[in-house]
Each structure stands twice: as C-alpha cells, then as structure tokens.
Image: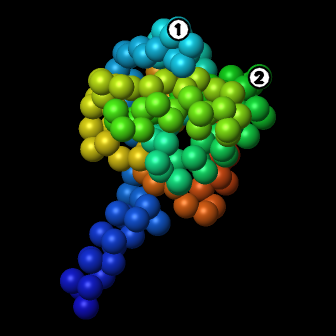
Amino acid sequence: MKILSQILIVVLLLTGNISLANNKVTTPVPAFQLKNLKGKRVNIKDFKDKVVIISFWATWCTPCKRELDDANTLYKKYNKDGLEVLAIATDGPETYSQIRGTVKRHKWRFHVLPDKEGEVTSILNPRGTVPYSIYIKNNKIMYDHEGYAQGDAERMNKYIKTLLK
C-alpha cells in the first residue's frame, strides 16, 4: 500500500496535478537578460522595485497558456501597483516560429522573452519543467510553483496580493 501511495504521488507530480514546489524560498535571483519579441533587451535588474512573475512556458503546452492567460488578467489588474510578468518561452527549433502567433492570439500584454539557447532556463529552471513559475520581490525568489491546474489562478492572485503589500 505504501508503494502504491508513492507511485500515485509521482504520477500526480508528473501530470502537474500537485506540486511540491509551492515553497517560500527567498533566494536571490541571478542576473539575466533576454531579448523580447521586438528585439529589445529586457534585464531582470530593471524590475528591482517590482513584484515579478517569471513563467517558463512553451507553445505546445496547454497548461502553460492557461497560466499565462490568468497571468495576463493579473497583469492588467496589478501592473499599476507594481506587477510585471516575464514569460520565458522555452520552445525548441521545431516550435520556435509559433511563439509570436501564440502571443498575438492570446493578447498577452506582458514581456515575452524567447530563450532560444536555453541560457536562462538552464539557470532558473534546470529541469526544464513547463509550466514553472517563480515569484520575485526585491530581486529575491519568494515562491515557486510547478504545473498549472484548476484553482491555481486563485493561488496566483493570493501570492501577488501578498507580495504587493
């Protein structure tokens, strides 16, 4: 029975239905910069006084797009209060060309940063999990979360409201 329970937990983790990554971690964010879809460099240091969600996603990942749709709603609501969203696209060569169209279809208004070479992903998301989000305040990682499921929009809103205080 114990083995069956452990197998169930692993299956739930792999499918994104539960996450052990909901931890408050408070570690410094390594410096990085990437170019946005318009070719402008975006540097994490530019957001030192903001609350930032860094979301790792891919065009083929349905839960990623649901998470970013919810992040877009929060961005519209809280941007004036200091929220920024950096959506780091982890697409490989076979889907890289779909990034711009996906962003346009979903009408995301935040920063979308393709990580074509995987430089930032290898540092902040070495397992390459998508969706995977990091919540930052004062250049420190305050929370992280792996996967995206029903009810996670409420969790995101709660994190943001807490960090903006």
Disc 1 is placed on an element classified as loop
Name the image quarter holding the N terminus.
bottom left
- Residue 77 quadrant: top right
Tell me, what colour scheme is on the image? rainbow
Q: Residue 80: image x %, image y %? A: 77, 22
Q: Residue at x 49, y 42 (%)?
A: 59
Any part of residue 109 in sight: yes
Q: Front-most of 93 and 15?
A: 93
Left or right of 49: which side holds 33? left
Tell me the quarter of the image containing the C terminus.
Answer: top right
- Nearer the viewer's eye, disc 1 or disc 2? 1
How packed mark 2 is, by other alpha carbons closer than 10 Å (few <14, some 14-19, many 20 or more), is few
Q: Position of residue 140 (x, y in %)?
A: 44, 26
Is residue 164 among the parts visible in the rendering?
A: no
Residue underneath mark 2 = 80
Residue, far left: 3
In the rendered view, does 110 fall on the left or right side of 63?
right
Q: Is residue 60 left or right of residue 94?
A: right
At a point 63% along the width and 61% down the height, the residue shown is: 151
CA gap between label 1 and label 2 equals: 22 Å
Counting residues from the N terminus, which is met first, the one under dot 1 or under dot 2? 1
Tell me the amino acid under the disc marked 1.
Answer: Lys
Side of 38 where 88 appears, left or right:
left
Residue 86 screen position, x and y as percent: 54, 27
Q: Is residue 90 above or below residue 82?
A: below
Q: Which residue is mark 1?
A: 40
What secondary structure is marked by label 2? helix
Q: Are marks 1 and 2 in contact (CB under 8 Å)?
A: no
